[in-house]
């Protein structure tokens, strides 16, 4: 479906209104009630949305996020900013980050884990959208942010990859894709002490519990937080003692793409030769790491459980890590592109839109309404769209863009995720990052389909 010029304009206004309504001045709530704080990768997508409205506001979103960066270089997954009338569980007291030597100073409050590094992609997009008159100002702000961006990538390439494998180790399901079945076996293996009694708030907002992780998941999420807290978020200590260490191919792919984006920005940022060669090294090591876990039989990349010493062989969106990374390997692309449109993924004949689901409908763990276990997440399809463009697959990218906008327009309220068979909106409404990617796709509509990538 393609949307008419009139309805595109209406959708653009409504998407802009979502960002304005969720705007807290210098940062944006991820969603009005369910997620009242600043989330890391949400902020990056949100900045892309703001870039279509005001490039200064867009870069402010990232400046404020990076103001909470840890001394290690880690950009925390949540910066707690909402007032007392807007509760979120688990709040800062569960994380006790002030006890961590590397945490930012009081009064900044954060969690002690991180999320995929989409930020460099956002900075590149902001720069591409900066009108000439504002370039001196925005260039100066990119230059000021640059050392923080490089230190963030350095943290991921070193502390989160002590093996030098090119693959990032994640410590927690909340590092991006919460209840993805990719984590099931590893979580089931953990010996845990039941956490102190707690009350979930998410299931008060999303009344249909089947759209959210289970209490079994939450018990494990909180147990892992208690261990991270005990190790004072010290990466070396975590690596020595902690039970959940996963080489995440999707996270690693985003890092490879983000390293490429920083290289594209290197001249704007006035980057040193040392920075350029480090970024090139991290990017290439990322490609190699992904090549090492590419399975030619399934055509997918598999995550790896470091503790169990075993591959995680599941069909999910993450398996397309080579595409998300914009792999230079033509062989991997030749296998993955047809697989993407097979009945196991976008090409399920019963899907309403030909979009990438979070989990393959052919996977026994698939649940079409449950969060990361089946639904379609617009931001994931945005990352895929961007990659397909960069790989020169313009026609497929354009179909993905149109279907994504069709899905969002049919809902009209910027849902967090969507049921693939019916297109039913799920989770939170008025989710900031859904509005943000809609703005980017709509601008590409105005430009005849292509965006500067
Ligand atoms: C926990 C904010 C975040 C996203 C995550 C998504 C969800 C949080 C939650 O919402 O996670 O971080 O409470 O479920 O899984 O990717 O960043 O939108």
Image: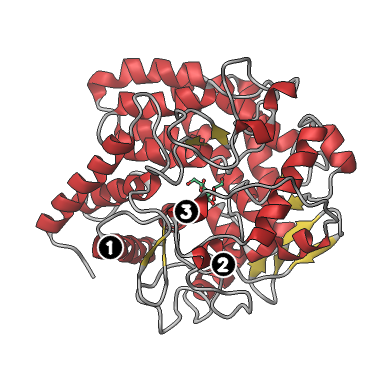
- On the rendered structure, is 130 left or right of 213? left
Nearer-the-camera pick, 311 or 407 = 407
Mark 2 highlights which residue? 373
As drawn, the residue found furthest toward the right would be 240
Extreme residue in the left direction: 6
Reply above or below: 35 against 275.
below
Rounded to the nearest angstrom, the CA distance separating label 3 from label 1 is: 22 Å
- Residue 223 image point, x, y percent: 76, 47
Q: Secondary structure at mark 1?
A: helix
The residue under label 1 is 411
Is 256 or 50 nearer to us in this picture? 50
**Distance from the alpha carbon under mark 2 to that under mark 3:** 20 Å
Query: Which secondary structure lies at badge 2?
Result: helix
Q: Which residue is mark 3?
A: 204
In the picture provided, is 143 more to the left or to the right than 444? right
Give whichever of 434, 37 is nearer the camera. 37
Q: Residue at x 34, y 34 (%)?
A: 128
Left of 69 or right of it: where is 36? left
Residue that appears at 76% across and 59% down:
187
Residue 22 in sight here: yes
State the mark number for residue 173. none
The answer to whether mark 2 is within 8 Å of ligand 1 is: no
For label 1, the crowd category at 10 Å Cα-Cα, with few meaning under 14, some 14 to 19 and many 20 or more, is some
Of the image marks 2 and 1, the number of the one nearer the N terminus? 2
Residue 359, picture quadrant:
bottom right
Q: Position of residue 147 (x, y in %)?
A: 57, 20
For label 3, being within 8 Å of ligand 1 is answered: no
How busy is the neighbourhood of tag 2: few (under 14 within 10 Å), some, or many (20 plus)?
many
Q: Secondary structure at mark 3?
A: helix
């Amino acid at each position: 479906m393609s949307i008419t010029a009139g309805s595109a304009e209406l959708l653009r206004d409504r998407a802009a209104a979502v960002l304005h309504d969720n705007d807290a001045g210098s940062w944006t709530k991820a969603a009005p009630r369910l997620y009242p704080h600043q989330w890391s990768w949400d902020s990056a997508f949100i900045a892309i949305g703001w870039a279509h409205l005001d490039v200064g506001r867009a870069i402010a979103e990232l400046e404020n996020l990076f103001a909470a960066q840890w001394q290690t270089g880690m950009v925390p997954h949540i910066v707690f900013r909402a007032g007392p009338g807007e509760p979120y569980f688990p709040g800062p007291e569960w994380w006790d980050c002030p006890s961590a030597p590397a945490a930012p100073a009081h009064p900044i409050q954060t969690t002690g884990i991180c999320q995929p590094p989409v930020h460099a992609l956002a900075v590149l997009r902001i720069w591409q959208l900066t009108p000439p008159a504002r370039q001196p100002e925005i260039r100066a702000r990119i230059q000021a942010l640059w050392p923080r961006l490089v230190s963030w990538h350095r943290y991921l390439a070193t502390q989160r990859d002590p093996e030098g494998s090119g693959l990032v180790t994640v410590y927690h399901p909340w590092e991006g894709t919460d209840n993805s079945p990719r984590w099931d076996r590893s979580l089931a293996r953990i010996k845990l002490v039941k956490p102190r009694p707690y009350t979930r708030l998410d299931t008060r907002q999303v009344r249909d519990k089947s759209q959210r992780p289970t209490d079994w998941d939450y018990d494990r999420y909180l147990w892992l937080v208690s261990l991270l807290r005990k190790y004072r978020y010290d990466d070396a200590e975590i690596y020595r003692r902690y039970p959940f260490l996963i080489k995440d191919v999707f996270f690693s792919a985003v890092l490879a793409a983000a390293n490429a984006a920083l290289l594209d920005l290197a001249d704007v940022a006035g980057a040193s030769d040392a920075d350029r060669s480090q970024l090139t090294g991290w990017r290439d090591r990322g490609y190699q790491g992904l090549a090492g876990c590419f399975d030619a039989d399934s055509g997918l990349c598999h995550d790896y459980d470091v503790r169990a010493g075993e591959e995680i062989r599941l069909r999910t969106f993450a398996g397309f890590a080579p595409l998300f990374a914009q792999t230079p390997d033509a062989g991997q692309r030749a296998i993955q592109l047809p697989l993407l449109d097979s009945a196991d993924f976008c090409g399920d004949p019963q899907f309403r839109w030909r979009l990438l689901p979070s989990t393959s409908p052919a996977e026994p763990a698939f649940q079409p309404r449950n969060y990361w276990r089946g639904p379609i997440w617009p931001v994931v399809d945005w990352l895929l769209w961007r990659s397909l463009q960069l790989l020169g697959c313009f026609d497929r990218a354009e179909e993905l863009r149109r279907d994504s906008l069709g899905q969002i327009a049919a809902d009209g309220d910027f849902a967090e995720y969507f049921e693939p068979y019916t297109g039913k909106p799920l989770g939170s409404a008025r989710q900031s990052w859904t509005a943000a990617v809609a703005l980017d796709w709509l601008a590409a509509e105005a430009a005849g389909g292509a965006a500067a990538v």
